Amino acid sequence: MAPSPSTFPYVLGWDSAGTEAAVGRNVTRFDVGERVYASTMPLPRGGFYAEYAVVEAEFAARVPDRLPTEQAGAMAWDALTALSGLERLRVAARAPATQETEPSAA
């Protein structure tokens, strides 16, 4: 899908986080008042550097409880960029390393 040409005035920003002010009638994953973060592709009139923004539910996720909303605002594209790099390097998921509890031979 090719982005539409930009028009003036253009609102910058592809990442966002905040509190749901409203949800569409078909949205079941989110409720008004929940903290969410989202990403969007370039839109003809711009993005998220605004007091209110609209995004499709499929491009949004809940902000983890322990993460400040301000930090979550940068998470969407940063996480996608990191995931893309891992996929390019073909880094496979693996179980976390465990620390050995047996004394080592000296």
Image: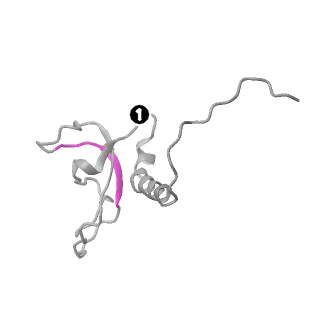
Residue 9 position within the rendered picture, expressed as x and y whole percent measured from the top left: 25, 72
Q: Quadrant of residue 51?
A: bottom left
User: Residue at (81%, 28%) from the top-left corner?
Assistant: 104
Residue segment shown in magenta: 14-23
| Residue designated by label 1 | 65
Residue 93 position within the rendered picture, expressed as x and y whole percent measured from the top left: 50, 44
Q: Is residue 13 magenta?
A: no
Q: Nearer the viewer, residue 1 or 28?
A: 1
State the residue lying farthest toward the right: 106
Q: Is residue 21 magenta?
A: yes
Residue 24 position within the rendered picture, expressed as x and y whole percent measured from the top left: 14, 45
The quarter in which the N terminus is drawn is bottom left
User: Residue at (22%, 70%) from the top-left corner?
Assistant: 44
User: Residue at (40%, 37%) from the top-left corner?
Assistant: 64
Q: Quadrant of residue 97?
A: top right
Element under label 1? loop
Residue 35 position within the rendered picture, expressed as x and y whole percent measured from the top left: 32, 39
Q: Nearer the viewer, residue 106 or 34?
A: 106
The quarter in which the C terminus is drawn is top right
User: Residue at (29%, 37%) from the top-left corner?
Assistant: 34
**Seen in the image, is 53 located left or right of residue 82?**
left
Q: Nearer the viewer, residue 61 or 48?
A: 61
State the residue lying farthest toward the left: 25
State the residue lying farthest toward the top: 102
Q: Quadrant of residue 41?
A: bottom left
* Colour pattern: one colour
**Dot 1 amino acid type:** Asp
